[in-house]
């Protein structure tokens, strides 16, 4: 499909933007997340100096070697540990400075998802640097991880404190069985083609700092410009999925396997194959699901009451497209996000309804310029609240902070169907707010001398 993005009037400094921020990951892929603690400032700066040649930029290339890359990001505590000056620290977004654990109540991370239960060291002040290495296959991943390892190993004062391996299956499906990562905004000037012809490319400043955003102004950027420009905020969350509970829930409410698949699709807004309900409401169309030229090319305009795709379905909540009243679709553009979700843990074999005790789920990754009005807004106002769709008591049926009493309405004729007793299917194991600087900014950090 031809995209207007590549020729739009903005020139992004792709050589300076980290590859992980703008580039689609290869498919399939394997990856590793590493968290590091900086115990000595000088060692932290040496680490960053060593990372500069390891981290790849978003420049275009047909070289398959560039399908494997490393992304580096820092928490607020990490920037402090590097000795970033006070005035600069104070110029970062307030949510970033607080850190994700401090935002837990707001985000609905309570009870089993509360920070007091998070997997250590997630959510603690020990997490300073996050590295993500990924590659199309295990052999090449080893080489990339080795590059990252050389940057931090045998460097006294730097401690590797957490590692999480992850992968994307060739089908792109994650633990609940759905193909994920389909709905993404086209970013003006990125050169990555749009997949939804109904959504004009979103201004680059919504995702990369230093460029105008959808409001026409420059989003608040950390100072100095040498540090803020071409950076992006990253949200990183380890989300455990209760797959057996989810399958049991569907089994108990459906008369047959076909109905289970239908209920599951209504909850997500897409069939497991990825085919959107908006385009095939009655039954799955796997050839549509796998077709990147068609599987994201739809709107909700002709389905205001949600007979095809319920307004409460996960994907429709997370991106209502043109379904909001009045100025809605303009408003929606202020809440878009780049997602880089990935699987961890062994899949629960098909048909198994008993929990095997394995930890499995999704490492959810967000990239954007506005933690509050993008990630936090979508999480709190759209996924964990139903006021905007006229169902204040309903949360997202799949990923919402449900408590065992949640409901989900499926509009249908002659009478709607209402599912009740929704438990939480997703438990937060922990997470961090990070900042992924541009490549020049990495050098700036390495050369700090305060
Ligand atoms: C374990 C947790 C989650 C699971 C299993 C999950 C699963 C999915 C699936 C299956 C889709 C449809 C496929 C696609 O368009 O990529 C989707 C779409 C999406 N999800 Fe999630 N998701 C999770 C958490 C979240 C969270 C926490 C957010 C945001 C705060 C989010 C935001 C989105 C967005 C923006 C879309 C794309 C909607 C569109 O453009 O049509 N998801 N998700």
Image: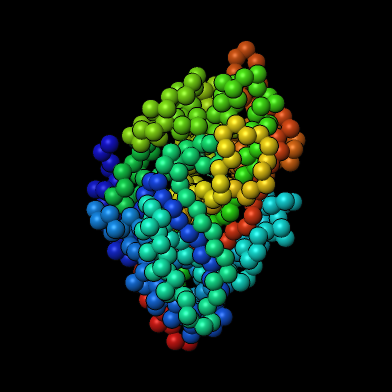
Please name the residue shown 44% across and 87% down the image. 449
Question: Residue 415: in sight, yes or no?
Answer: yes
The image position of residue 323, as x and y in percent, is 50, 32
Residue at (40% x, 46% y) in the render:
28
Rendered-image quadrant of the N terminus: top left
Q: Quadrant of residue 311?
A: top right
- Against 4, residue 297 (above or below) is above
349 vs 368: above or below: above
Residue 384, percent from left and from top: 64, 43
Please give the count of numbered marks on the rendered protein: 0
Q: Is residue 447 left or right of residue 249?
A: left
Q: Residue at x 39, y 69 (%)?
A: 147
Viewer-nearest residue: 134 or 297? 134
Q: Residue at x 59, y 48 (%)?
A: 360
Question: To which quarter of the image does residue 351 belong?
Answer: top right
Image coloring type: rainbow
Residue 189: horizontal and vertical position, in percent? 30, 52
Counting from the top left corner in percent of width and height, residue 292 is at 35, 36
Whether 378 is drawn above or below 448: the answer is above
The answer to whether one can see residue 90 in this image is no
Residue nearest the viewer, comparing 20 with 259: 259
**Residue, far bottom:** 450
Which of 10/103 is in front? Answer: 103
């Amino acid at each position: 499909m031809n995209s207007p993005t590549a020729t739009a009037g903005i020139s992004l400094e792709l050589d300076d933007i980290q590859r992980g921020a703008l580039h689609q990951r290869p498919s399939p892929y394997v990856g590793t997340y590493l968290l590091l603690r900086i115990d000595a400032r000088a060692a932290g700066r040496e680490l960053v100096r060593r990372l500069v040649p390891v981290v790849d930029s978003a420049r275009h290339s047909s070289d398959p070697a560039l399908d494997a890359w490393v992304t580096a990001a820092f928490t607020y505590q990490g920037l402090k540990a590097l000795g970033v000056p006070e005035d600069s620290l104070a110029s970062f977004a307030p949510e970033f400075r607080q850190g994700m654990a401090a935002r837990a109540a707001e985000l609905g991370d309570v009870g089993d998802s509360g920070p007091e239960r998070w997997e250590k060291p997630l959510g603690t002040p020990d997490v300073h640097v996050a590295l993500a290495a990924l590659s199309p296959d295990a052999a090449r991943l080893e080489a990339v991880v080795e590059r990252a390892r050389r940057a931090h190993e045998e460097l006294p004062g730097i401690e590797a404190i957490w590692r999480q391996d992850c992968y994307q299956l060739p089908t792109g499906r994650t633990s609940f069985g759905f193909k994920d990562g389909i709905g993404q905004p086209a970013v003006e000037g990125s050169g990555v083609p749009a997949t939804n012809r109904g959504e004009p490319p979103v201004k680059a400043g919504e995702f990369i700092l230093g460029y105008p955003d959808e409001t026409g102004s420059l989003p608040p950027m950390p100072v100095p410009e040498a540090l803020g420009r071409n950076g992006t905020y990253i949200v990183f969350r380890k989300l455990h999925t209760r797959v057996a509970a989810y399958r049991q829930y569907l089994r108990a409410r459906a008369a047959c396997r076909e109905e289970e698949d239908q209920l599951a699709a209504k909850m997500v807004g897409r069939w497991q194959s990825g085919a959107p309900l908006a385009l095939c409401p009655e039954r799955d169309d796997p050839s549509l699901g796998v077709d990147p030229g068609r599987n994201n090319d739809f709107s909700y305009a002709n389905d205001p009451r949600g007979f095809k795709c319920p307004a409460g379905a996960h994907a429709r909540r997370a991106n209502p497209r043109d379904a909001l009243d009045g100025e809605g679709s303009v408003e929606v553009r202020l809440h878009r996000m780049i997602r880089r979700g990935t699987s961890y843990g062994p899949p629960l074999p098909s048909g198994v309804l008993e929990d095997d005790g394995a930890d499995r789920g999704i490492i959810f990754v967000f990239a954007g310029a506005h933690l509050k009005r993008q990630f936090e807004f979508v999480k709190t106002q759209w996924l964990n609240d139903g006021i905007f769709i006229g169902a204040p008591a309903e949360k997202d049926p799949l990923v919402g902070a449900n408590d065992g009493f949640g409901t989900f309405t499926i509009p249908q004729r002659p009478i709607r169907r209402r599912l009740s007793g929704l438990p939480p299917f997703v438990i937060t194991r922990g997470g961090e707010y990070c900042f992924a600087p541009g490549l020049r900014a990495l050098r700036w950090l390495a050369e700090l001398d305060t």
